[in-house]
Amino acid sequence: MEVILDTSFILSCMRKRIDFLSQLEEQGFMVKIPKEVIQELKDLHSRSKTSEEDRICIKTIFDIFEKRKIKKTSLGTRNVDDGLIKKGKEGVYIATLDQFIKRNIPKKIVIFNAKNAVGVE
């Protein structure tokens, strides 16, 4: 099974110190990150309004992605949300916190706050 990560999901997991990559892999998922999400993270990192905590999270996640050799993919669209919805409708699991995306896809990965864990909704 394949899961594609969204920016909101990545940052939230990092802020909560959830080892989402290991948890997803243990559940049998092959984790992929879209090049468009990588660009969103880079843009967010360079914005002056971004908190120092988020900058550290973003730098850390890039280090983790590189170290773990997380596969990159392309959504094939400029709009990340549209691309995630398209992939979700094709049957790919999407890890996101975005309510609009979640309403438009059948297979979602969510954060279970009470357990500090991630899994299928």
Image (spheres, rainbow, N blue to C red):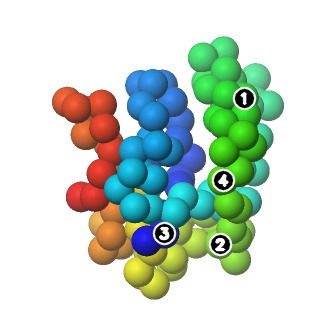
Of the two numbered discs 1 and 4 on the same chain, state the one appearing first in sequence. 1
- Give the x, y percent position of residue 40: 69, 48
The residue to which callout 3 is attached is 2
The residue to which callout 2 is attached is 75
x 72%, y 29%: residue: 59
User: Mark 3 Cα within 10 Å, few/some/many (few <14, many 20+)?
Assistant: some
Q: Are marks 4 and 3 in contact (CB under 8 Å)?
A: no
User: Can I make out residue 48 in this image?
Assistant: yes
- Give the x, y percent position of residue 83: 58, 72
Amino acid carrying mark 1 in the image: Lys
Of 47 and 76, nearer the camera is 76
Of the two numbered discs 4 and 3 on the same chain, state the one appearing first in sequence. 3
Compute the Cα span from label 2 to label 3: 14 Å
User: Mark 4 Cα within 10 Å, few/some/many (few <14, many 20+)?
Assistant: some
Compute the Cα span from label 2 to label 1: 23 Å
Compute the Cα span from label 4 to label 2: 16 Å
- Give the x, y percent position of residue 43: 76, 41
Of circles 1 and 4, which is in front?
A: 4
Residue 112 left/right relative to 63 = left
The residue to which callout 4 is attached is 70
Q: Quadrant of the C terminus?
A: bottom left
Of circles 2 and 1, which is in front?
A: 1
x 72%, y 40%: residue: 67
Determine whether the residue tagged by mark 1 lies in a helix, strand or loop: helix
Of the two numbered discs 2 and 1 on the same chain, state the one appearing first in sequence. 1
Of 15 and 24, nearer the camera is 24
Amino acid carrying mark 2 in the image: Leu
Of the two numbered discs 3 and 1 on the same chain, state the one appearing first in sequence. 3
User: Mark 2 Cα within 10 Å, few/some/many (few <14, many 20+)?
Assistant: many
